[in-house]
Image: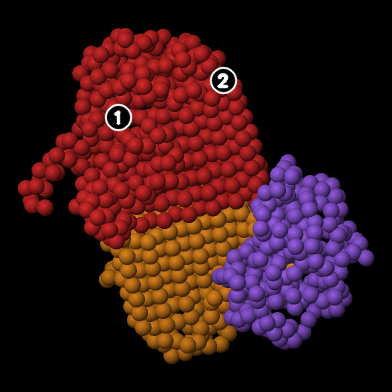
Amino acid sequence: MSATAETVRQVEEATGKYKYGFVTDIEVDKAPKGLSEDTIRMISAKKEEPEWMLEWRLKAYATWLKMDDPDWAMLNYPPIDYQDIHYYAAPKNADGPKSLDEVDPELLRTYEKLGIPLHEQEMLAGVAVDAVFDSVSVATTFREKLAEVGVIFCPISEAIKNHPDLVKAYIGSVVPQGDNYFTALNSAVFTDGSFVYIPKGVRCPMELSTYFRINEKDTGQFERTLIIAEEGSYVSYLEGCTAPQRDENQLHAAVVELVTMDDAEIKYSTVQNWYPGDENGKGGIYNFVTKRGACRGARSKISWTQVETGSAITWKYPSCILQGEGSVGEFYSVAVTNNAQQADTGTKMIHIGANTKSTIISKGISAGRSNNTYRGLVRMMPGAENARNFTQCDSLLVGDQCGAHTVPYITSRNPSAKVEHEATTSRISEDQMFYCLQRGMTTEDAVSLIVNGFCKEVMKELPMEFAVEAQKLIGISLEGSVG
Amino acid sequence: MPLLEIENLHASIGDKPILKGINLTINPSEIHAIMGPNGSGKSTLSYVLAGRDGYEVTDGDIRLDGVSVMEMEADERARAGLFLAFQYPVELPGVGGMSFLRGAVNARRIEAGLGEIDHIAFVKTVREAANKLGIKDDMLKRAVNVGFSGGEKKRYEILQMALLEPKMAILDETDSGLDVDALRIVSEGVNALKTDDIGVLVITHYQRLLDYIIPDHVHILADGKIVKSGDKTLALEVEKSGYGEFTNAA
Amino acid sequence: MPHDVVSFERLAADAASRYADNGWPGSKDEAWRFTNINAIRKTEFSPADTAITGTSSEINFIHFINGVHQPIDNMSFNDGIICQKLTDNAGLSSALAAAIPHGHHVADFALAHASDGLAITIDQVVDNPLQMIFDYSGDGISSHPVVVIKLLPGADLTILEEHKGDGAGLSAPVMLFCVEEGAKLHHARRLIESDQRYHLGLNLVQQKSKSVYSGDMVMAGGDITRSETQVSLMEADAQSYLNAVYLGRDAQMRDVTSRIDHDAPDCQSFQRIHGVLDNQSKAVFQGKVKVERYAQKTDGNQMSRTLILSREAEANTKPELEIYADDVTCSHGATIGELDSDQLFYLMSRGIGCDEARQMLIEAFLMDVVDALDDPKREWLIEPIEHWIKTRVS
């Protein structure tokens, strides 16, 4: 490639690759920068929360003040100034629209540009969507239809007001406030997120999904999701995230809690495409997320599937606590890092009950100057009679300036439990590349094809609607990684 | 006296009943064949006879030489003269073939009050027996079944049978994975062992093994029960018309 | 790589000041996450300082008692083995000073308290093995033998090493093996100290181009026993093999820690670790393989398998890969579980009793690691394994 063409390409990449990098110009209601008890009182007041919720937040804040930033992950980033962040930003007149007609048309256009036309989804796709824009939920579709079968799907801020008993019973029960630095922070300042309740014996009639969008400058997004699946119920939940392209880093610290009772199943899928920063590592989202599910009931199942392509920093370990006898935990993950991105992601499988079973399939792809770490923990407790774990984690290196790391922790305290772990690291072979090129593919198509093949075991776990999008995303994320 | 008597045998895996009342009597020097479609309970029967953990016998009895084996562990049944040639012989990495064979032979001898076998004489016996089955010396030196081909594993099973001199031999799908030549060698091995008093139970899906090891009686197993018994012509009948009529009947 | 000249006295003094600052590793120290050394931390050990005389005059035989080596004059060696006091070999004491990992509490403790050590240079192929016997005794005594062995280009040596003895004491040996271009070091170590002893050993291996290090270890003794091996593959085409068997019973703690740094292209490392845990014993295998950016064509392979024989035992494994080069083949595998029920049934179906069948499978599992070795290494290592199995109460 000529020098000129190379320059042109680079400029194009730097400016046009992240297609969700636009900003929505909308009037917002914002808290001043900084974190204090007053900030928390202000958030709680904005949300018109009951007193107990405020107390709960203040308790978390007190815990957070006593904690330190975790430093064990293979991540490098400058200290975060927690006083330089807006903890609340909401589009004006966005407090709980009842139907899409009431939503600000500018917001609807935003979601359309993101590929999530809310109207269309409501009409055609049969997917119920909760759209969270900065600190608030701006729209939740299909609520009436879901209500007919008793499914509650609403912003968590609304659930706190309308279903306080359910929220009180479960919030913080899977991820305690003081679990880690970011959960304490989230518990103090969370602004919105989704709440899902599937009653006994109900198979949720459609996919539920939430789209998170960070729009405002210098804001943090602290959402909180709580999903409860009662005995014998089933739900499939999808989550997507994007943010504008900005030079400053923005913080996203979410908490997701899942609970399954006897024979219940939650399938939780994520396509994480937060702005990853430019090719020099400028800007991008710092993504510190705690996701955990408790399989409380016998034979219950929680399955996490994630495709992680975005964020400057990813720190995320969706986990399962397998308490119920015969319960099943699954973790399927694809993490792609390019340019200066850093990801430290994996899972924990805690086997408490007898005959519990877990499967971990992790595919890490590193390109550019990025670093990609799988960090996992499998623990067989003394009561985990005949429990089984199988872990396969494979890393693929694209180029010779990146890093791929594997850090599994395995503990067994029950002889009848069986743990198997396998890990490999390799690169795309020259033979594979040549074969594709010889068949007329471009380098980028070939990389995308081979990488998608490498990830196939995980991609097939995604719901159809997401799989195609995720596949394209992986290709886009790796653009420019092979030259 | 009958050699092996299976009486009203019921067995389950977990809560699922697999064998639902099997009755079968094998006298010394008889060859019986049990045929049946996949899932009829053939392998379960062989494991239950050999005393494998994980199968619950819910009713019935199994007697070897008139003595019930129900309270006996797998090794006790083996020493009492019951031999199972596995459908899928298990690999034992690190366990040397010779010490394995010697261990098995000695366990029996010690119980019979014969004392351990002479080392050099034993090596010679094993070599000769192996030779007849086309097993190379090199294979005897390796860890048990590790790196053996499918055919080699089956020959090795028959070698063990020759050395352990059982009263009652159960051959579980011994023909699976064998080509015609291997099938012939293995069958010759089995036929060579057939003395006046040994009983043989051949468990198989296909008739072709029965061209080589000719059964006195053939039984059809379907859904955990013997649904039809006859002579060797029954096997040919099945070969022609399949198991359809039996599965429907069961 | 030339380093500053550091006398052994200076090395010990530096270590002492680091130890004074840092002390023992804390419970939050990642390298000690699974191994609780409170019992060691709480004990006031005093170093043995008695000079020893005599001992054996066998050829190629080195004897340490409570960390102190026998007089140099009493030792005799085959051609090719040059043995000096470390205080008399500034070259090797400097090499050791440069090799001590930064912030290594136990190395600092050991070197701070060591009175002297041995510097052994091998300059040709030596056919007869070198035996190194470390004897320990006495309650409350800490022993810190220090040995640096350098194989010059083309040299070849077999080392048979043993740590044994009793008394409620602590052994903290520090050893450095420099394997120069094309040299080969075959190293068999058995740790068979008695049940109330503590052992925290550090082994450093530095390999130049085309060198081969093969280290095989059986860890069978001691209450808390940790063996840490750090290998630097500093130049191209070096090969390293680390095999270990660890055996735990009662309330013992077993810790096999390894770190392999691939700092040069075209090197290979292979690790196989098999452990058996009985009663209330606990163990950890933590092994890290790090491949630097320029270490292309690295082949790094690691396999850890643990057998748990008792309901109260605990097995921990942390195999770690840190990789910055793309043209590599790196893998690790780990399994933890009990004896395979299919294998057990197969043996029993041949008439072998349950207990005997279990013993056979345990033995096979352990022998798997050492069986392919040549004598005298094989014999050296099989003995403690067989002893352990024989004395196992099933």
**What residue does disc 2 label?**
A199
Q: Earlier in the sequence, mark 1 or mark 2?
A: 2
| Residue C350 position by quadrant | bottom right
Percent of width and height locating residue B242: 66, 54
Identified by mark 2, the residue type is Pro
| Residue A15 position by quadrant | top left
Q: Nearer the viewer, residue B157 or B194?
A: B194
Q: Residues within 10 Å of mark 2 (few under 14, many from 20)?
A: some
Pointer 1 and pointer 2 on the same chain? yes
Q: Relative to A91, is C122 on the left or the right?
A: right
Q: Relative to A216, is A57 on the left or the right?
A: right
Percent of width and height locating residue B97: 65, 75
Chain B drawing hue: purple
Chain letter matching colour red = A
At x 75% / y 78%, what residue is drawn? B192
Percent of width and height locating residue C102: 37, 57
Q: Nearer the viewer, residue B199 or C87?
A: B199
Q: Do the CB atoms of the residues marked 1 and 2 lie less than 8 Å apart? A: no
Percent of width and height locating residue A11: 12, 40
Q: Which mark is residue A242?
A: 1
Chain letter matching colour orange = C
Identified by mark 1, the residue type is Thr
Where is A478 relative to A159, above or below? below
Q: Which mark is residue A152?
A: none
